[in-house]
Image (cartoon, rainbow, N blue to C red):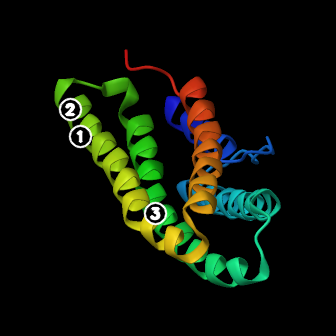
Amino acid sequence: MHSFRVLAILAVALTTSGAMAQTATTQGDIDTDIALLRSDVQAQKTDIIAHSMQLTDAQAKAFWPLFRDYSHQQQVIGDQRVQLIKDYAAQYDTMDDAKAEALMNRWLSYDDAKTKLRSEYYPQFRNAIGAKQAVKFFQIDQRLSMIVDLKLASEIPIVQ
């Protein structure tokens, strides 16, 4: 039963607006709900960034294509987290040291991938919109990510 609880929590936690997911009964339903919610979150994130950045026309022309590429790469990395949480939920009741070790290694790999992505894209954003605006973007992006991380951390049960 922990599997469905954690997966439902994941679906809800991936939204920053607090919208509730319908209760999914099959893995396909869960995957569909997660995909829809992630799409909604991305749209909300784009709106928040557009409002917060206040880019000039020239900056916007350089920023938005780069942002789309960056967001796509974030989604690819985010897929790792979704799968990690699904696997954690599936193994929660039968967790042993070997499973915990494997999950931890994947979690560390996920964290490394996020950091590497920011490191790779910062110079591109800096060149496109200037250092101050690039830092502002990464601050906003990080804050939005922290909201999701905090929600996940508060809802996913700790290993027993």
Please give left or right for residue 77 compared with residue 37 in the image.
left
Q: Mark 2: which secondary structure?
A: helix
What residue is shown at x 39% (from left), y 45% (from top)? 84
Q: How crowded is mark 1: few (under 14 residues within 10 Å), some or many (20 or more)?
A: few
Residue of label 3: 122
Residue 8 seen by the camera: no
Q: Quadrant of residue 44?
A: bottom right
C-alpha separation, residue under disc 1 versus residue under disc 2 = 6 Å
Label annotation for residue 101 = 2
Amino acid at the residue labelled 1: Asn
Question: Residue 127, position in %: x, y?
Answer: 50, 75
Q: In this view, does 88 lie above or below 111?
A: above
Check the image and report above or below for 23 versus 45: above
Q: Is residue 5 above or below residue 42?
A: above
Return the residue nearer the eye: 26 or 95: 95
Q: In this view, does 103 lie to the left or right of 150?
A: left
* Residue indicated by mark 1: 105
- For this orientation, the residue located farthest to the top is 160
Q: What amino acid is labelled 2 in the image?
A: Glu
**Residue 157: where, in percent of width, then height?**
50, 22
Which circle, 1 or 3, is nearer the viewer? 3
